[in-house]
Amino acid sequence: MDVEAGIQQLKKDLNAVILAHYYQESEIQDVADFVGDSLALAQQAEKTTADVIVFCGVHFMAETAKILNPNKLVLLPDLDAGCSLSDRCPPGPFKAFKDKHPDHFVVTYVNSSAAVKALSDVIVTSSNAVKIVSKIPADRKILFAPDQHLGRYVMKQTGRDMVLWPGACMVHEIFSEKRLVQLKVEHPEADVIAHPECEAPVLAHAHYIGSTKQLLEYTVSSPKQSFIVVTEAGIIHQMQLKSPGKTFIPAPPDNGCACNECPHMRLNTMEKLYRCMRDKTPRLDLHPELRQAAYAPLKRMLEWS
Ligand code: 13P
Ligand code: SF4
């Protein structure tokens, strides 16, 4: 059967909207109604009039859509699509960490579970973290979780000191600085563009640092013709679509592979997308109390963005 035609039909039958992150495989991006970064996807989820949200991304992203839309059905192709940042910041130890810093304003990256969000004062994404931290009164102490690399980048940009939870993204922390330097020598004409989840020595080579959406926009507006892309390779699909004449070189990880893919994001496939819409499962459910507690800091983020 034609899986894509089946998905299009189900979209009409369910009055569904398909939201996809840039790290999804190309076929999923092409069938989606909206492709974006974490902030844009949350904003899209907040304003959709569809009855059903089908979220092609990882668990915390679908959970965010559900927090914003408690009365809508939120489907996701694979319930096991997690995130190393979220998985390595469980709510129990996070609460203990927070309790050690009782006078701190808690800023939490959206790559976290609803239970951790519920313990936070404001949520940020890589698009708005610098802007939001800059809005916190200068006399407030700040605790930032769970990505220490994004946290350090934000500290550098804002001049604010922050206590950091020691988390990292399993994809962005394995970019090889040595292989990046080799690539720069091979392609001296290329700009290096990197996601702030990368480690500081890798970020030091970047001409531009930003969220996936910001990196994409940079490649469109820049007069440069080639780019070394230091983030998950899925984003290159949109870069090629928007700038067909330009060259995009994926930066390699230190494990011998040519490019870097998120194993969680890549659990989603067209077949699983079709089946989740046909069977209306797996679906994202949240306890109303937890949803309510996680909503307040998320809403604050959307207001401050
Ligand atoms: P963006 O919000 O930049 O798309 O980041 C999401 C993510 O998971 C990066 O690894
Ligand atoms: Fe999480 Fe990293 Fe995958 Fe993004 S790329 S979803 S931060 S593991």
Image: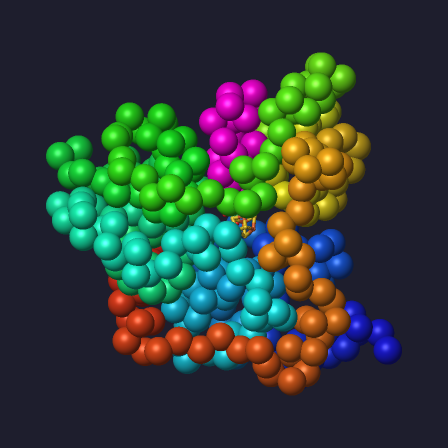
Q: Quadrant of residue 218?
A: top right
Q: What's the residue at 23%, 40% (across, down)?
A: 142
Q: Quadrant of residue 244?
A: top right
Q: What's the residue at 49%, 60% (across, down)?
A: 61
Q: Quadrant of residue 254?
A: top right
Q: Is residue 150 above or below residue 30?
A: above
Q: Position of residue 284 (x, y in %)?
A: 49, 75
Q: Is residue 145 above or below residue 282?
A: above
Which residue is outermost to the right? 1
Residue segment shown in magenta? 194-213
Q: Nearer the viewer, residue 208 or 285?
A: 285
Q: Nearer the viewer, residue 50 or 107?
A: 107
Q: Is residue 202 magenta?
A: yes
Q: What's the residue at 32%, 39% (across, down)?
A: 164
Q: Is residue 202 above or below residue 280?
A: above
Q: Is residue 50 above or below residue 40?
A: below
In the rendered view, does 67 fall on the left or right side of 105?
right
Q: Position of residue 271 (x, y in %)?
A: 75, 71
How many discs mark residues in the rendered view? 0
Q: What's the residue at 73%, 31% (across, down)?
A: 249
Q: Position of residue 264 (x, y in %)?
A: 60, 57
Q: Position of residue 209 (x, y in %)?
A: 51, 30
Q: Quadrant of the N terminus?
A: bottom right
Q: Is residue 223 visible?
A: no
In the rendered view, does 35 fall on the left or right side of 188?
left
The image's colouring method is: rainbow
Q: Is residue 156 visible?
A: yes
Q: Is residue 81 magenta?
A: no
